[in-house]
Image: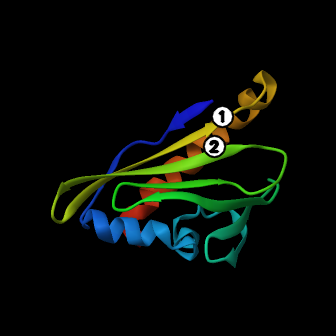
Amino acid sequence: MNLESPKVTLDKSAEETFNFLSDVKNFEALMPENISKFEVLDDDKFLFALKGMPEIVLKKKEAEPNRKIVLGAAGGKLDFSLVGNITEIDANKTEVQLSFNGEFNAMMAMMIKGPISKFIETLVTNMNKAV
């Protein structure tokens, strides 16, 4: 299953945007209002939970300076990744798009597609205020 957020344009350089997304504690500022738990576990790992959903642990798996950040599931039953693609438009303007990739059975994919689409859309929309 591959889902993509809308693209957002930030009035920040690619480097500033990358640095913000590289620091896992900054993801708390991007979370939706219905977050029930957020905890930094490590320099590159955090746990979060949305109301009515199980806790999810994300770990920074890959970083391509000023271009891409890859977070992946750290343990648990589901294997997926959340990729932040950063595109420099000019020195102080950057475009960001999040994509979610995971292998799920058809039933699971049907159940989580809506909530995950909304979740990544919220993360990227909140970047305008947080970054």
Residue 3 vertical position relative to residue 67 in the rendered view, above or below = above
Residue 79: give x, y in percent of width and height. 73, 43
Residue displayed at 66% across by 42% down: 115
Estimate how packed mark 1 is, as few (under 14), some (14 to 19) or many (20 or more) residues with alpha carbons within 10 Å. some
Quadrant (top left/top right/bottom left/bottom right) for the N terminus: top right
Q: Nearer the viewer, residue 47 or 28?
A: 47
Residue 100: give x, y in percent of width and height. 57, 42
Quadrant (top left/top right/bottom left/bottom right) for the C terminus: bottom left
Which disc is residue 116 wearing?
2
- Give the residue number, with chain letter if any, for mark 1: 113
Estimate how packed mark 2 is, as few (under 14), some (14 to 19) or many (20 or more) residues with alpha carbons within 10 Å. some
Residue 131 shows up from this direction = no
**Residue 90 in the figure: left or right of residue 63:** left
- Residue type at mark 2: give it: Ile
Residue 92 vertical position relative to residue 74 in the rendered view, above or below = below
Residue 31 vertical position relative to residue 112 in the rendered view, above or below = below
Q: Residue furthest top?
A: 106
**Residue 88 in the figure: left or right of residue 45:** left
Residue 10: give x, y in percent of width and height. 29, 60
Q: Nearer the viewer, residue 75 or 55?
A: 75
Residue 112 vertical position relative to residue 41 in the rendered view, above or below = above
Cα–Cα span, label 2 and label 1: 5 Å
**Residue 128 in the figure: left or right of residue 98:** left
- Residue type at mark 1: give it: Lys
Residue 31: give x, y in percent of width and height. 58, 64
| Colour treatment of the image | rainbow
Q: Are marks 2 and 1 in contact (CB under 8 Å)?
A: yes
Which disc is residue 25 wearing?
none
Residue 115 shows up from this direction = yes
Secondary structure of the residue carrying numbered label 1: helix
Secondary structure of the residue carrying numbered label 2: helix
Residue displayed at 74% across by 57% down: 74
